[in-house]
Amino acid sequence: MKLHRSVLKFLPLLTLTTAMGITAVGITTMGASLPARAADCAAGKTIKDGTLTIATGNPAYFPWVMDNDPSSGKGFEAAVAYAVAEKMGFSKDQVEWTSASFDQSIQPGTKDFDFNLQQFSITQEREKVVDFSAPYYSAAMAVLVRKGAVDNGAEPTVASLKNLKWGIDANTTALKMLQDNIMPTSDPLLYDDNVNVTEAMKANQIDAALFDLPTALYLAAVVLDDGVVLGQFPADRTETPDQFGLLMEEGSALKECVDNAVLAITNDGSLTKIEAQWLQETTGVPVIK
């Protein structure tokens, strides 16, 4: 799932360290800076010695990556990648980018990257075949429709949403969210990616779809001529907001290093600054009742 933003709730550091089994002692130590320790941690564990290979999608979209150029460091995920790399002891010149599809990346097996970030939701099922870092982003879920649905009476209420024809990317957590929170009167149409969901909306095959809020805002503003973000779900409507993690191959030797780096940028305020720069705090999207 992909793009823009409203309520970003990062877990407190204590929660993260407890959940991931990492302590502050694992992040800093007396007499050694974090980058120096992290560089030692990563030594001999990257695909290419002295280089951190990071993957993302191609194309990669605003606001995650600006102008489909992650090497610029512009965009939320591009900036996060370089911040994590720095905490791991890698300079910008020591970062090499590659591309990988979303579906291919979440499959088991050897990866040609050290870590990958393209809005991967952390799920128990995926954690059976890949490793995730501590979360770097938590997203509200939002309903995307076209203006015609609003003209026909669609409102940001569960009662109204039940009667819409839904389309969902079957590879994402949106399907469970739809079933748990809306329970539409007709079965949703399932697609293999968000592009096909959007195309179905353009072709009037579906009325509505669920995306993370940043993606919904982007699609409404850029992809659909008459897109409307009808509403967003509060965090208490689901077990937990969608949380994104850096993806690594299962059993990655870099996992501890990457976790420590993510926790470090959370703890020192870097992640908050990146979030503020690239993701809007206020969207004006109503909460679904």
Image: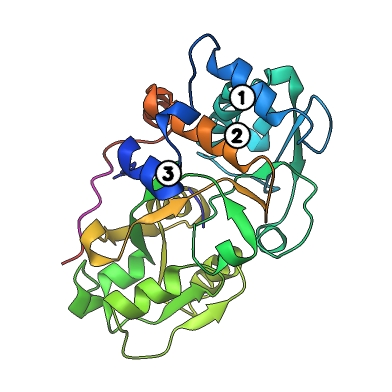
Q: Classify residue 149 by image quadrant.
A: bottom left
Secondary structure at numbered mark 2: helix
User: Does label 1 or label 2 sit earlier along the sequence?
Assistant: 1
Q: Residues within 10 Å of mark 1 (few under 14, many from 20)?
A: many
Q: CA distance from mark 3 to mark 1?
A: 22 Å
Nearer to the camera, 47 or 59: 47
Amino acid bearing label 1: Ala
Range of magenta residues: 283-287
- The percent position of residue 276, horizontal first and vertical second, equals 36, 28
Please say if the residues under marks 3 and 1 sit with CB atoms less than 8 Å apart: no
Nearer to the camera, 160 or 41: 41
Nearer to the camera, 143 or 83: 83
User: Does label 3 or label 2 sit earlier along the sequence?
Assistant: 3
Name the colouring of the figure.
rainbow
Amino acid bearing label 2: Cys
Residue 74 visible in the shown view: yes
Name the residue carrying label 1. Answer: 38
Residue 234 visible in the shown view: no
- 73 to 226, vertically: above or below: above
Name the residue carrying label 3. Answer: 137
3 vs 1, front mark: 1
Please say if the residues under marks 1 and 2 sit with CB atoms less than 8 Å apart: yes
What's the residue at 62%, 73% (across, down)? 192
Name the residue carrying label 2. Answer: 257
Q: Residues within 10 Å of mark 2 (few under 14, many from 20)?
A: many
Residue 86 appears left or right of 6: right
Q: Classify residue 255 by image quadrant.
A: top right
- Numbered badge on residue 267: none
- 106 to 85, vertically: above or below: below
